Image (cartoon, rainbow, N blue to C red):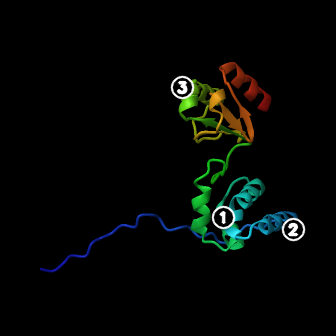
Amino acid sequence: MSQQPVNIQPLCQPVQMPEGIATFSPEVESEIDRHLAKYPVMRSAILPLMFIVQRERGYLDALGVAYLAKRLRLRITDIWEVATFYSMLNTKPVGKYHIQICKTLSCKIMGEPEITDYVCKKLGITPGETTADGKFTISLVECLGSCGTAPMFQVGFDYHEKLTTEKVDQILDALK
């Protein structure tokens, strides 16, 4: 009895290798060097360096990831693993104002679904989308650690808690 070869599909897609890597100003390179000096194991600097690349490029794009892999002497897949784990790291462009709405239990019980629906209707987009003018992006994220003041969302690094539709109106009007 002859054994037939088994057709095994790969479990994941091959990583796209960018054509080059990102470059940064001497000031940014100095900032990166200062962070690297703090960590005896270079890999430990991955998050602070990701924030720098994201700040400079707007998000972690393929060229920025390639830069990080080279600087940290890691594989590109090592960088993508971390980049896709944390909700505060963006792997695609986001609007000027990134509204991250907490979707976990405390917020859900205290009214998150209504707040999410209200924000989406007001901006005319759904979670994961950006307004046509590039101003607002909405994301649903895991716990932001403000359970006692639910429902809440974060815009940039600013927390907005105990949200009501009136508070949402005030916040969004101030950002426009």
Name the mark on residue 26.
2
Neighbour tally class for label 1: few under 14, some 14-19, many 20 plus, Cα within 10 Å: many
Marks 1 and 3 sit apart, C-alpha to C-alpha, by: 38 Å
Name the residue at 41% across, 64% down: 11
- Would you say the residues marked 3 and 2 are in contact, meaning their CB atoms lie under 8 Å apart? no
Front position in the image: 50 or 23: 50
Task: Name the residue at the top extreme.
Answer: 166
- Dot placed on the residue nearer the N-terminal end, 2 or 1: 2
Name the residue at 79% across, 28% down: 174
At mark 3, the secondary structure is helix
Which of the 4 image quadrants contains residue 172?
top right
Marks counted in the figure total 3
- Under mark 1, the amino acid is Val
In the displayed structure, 60 sits above or below 7; it is above
| Viewer can see residue 49 | yes
| Quadrant that contains the C terminus | top right
Neighbour tally class for label 2: few under 14, some 14-19, many 20 plus, Cα within 10 Å: few
Neighbour tally class for label 3: few under 14, some 14-19, many 20 plus, Cα within 10 Å: few
- Dot placed on the residue nearer the N-terminal end, 3 or 2: 2
Give how far across and how far down residue 18 sits, in percent: 63, 69
Name the residue at 77% across, 67% down: 36
Marks 2 and 1 sit apart, C-alpha to C-alpha, by: 19 Å
Q: Circle 1 is placed at which residue position?
A: 65
At mark 1, the secondary structure is helix
Give how far across and how far down residue 5 sits, in percent: 25, 76
Task: Name the residue at the right extreme.
Answer: 27
Direction from residue 64 to residue 141 in the image, left or right: left
Q: Circle 3 is placed at which residue position?
A: 109
Direction from residue 10 to residue 110 in the image, left or right: right
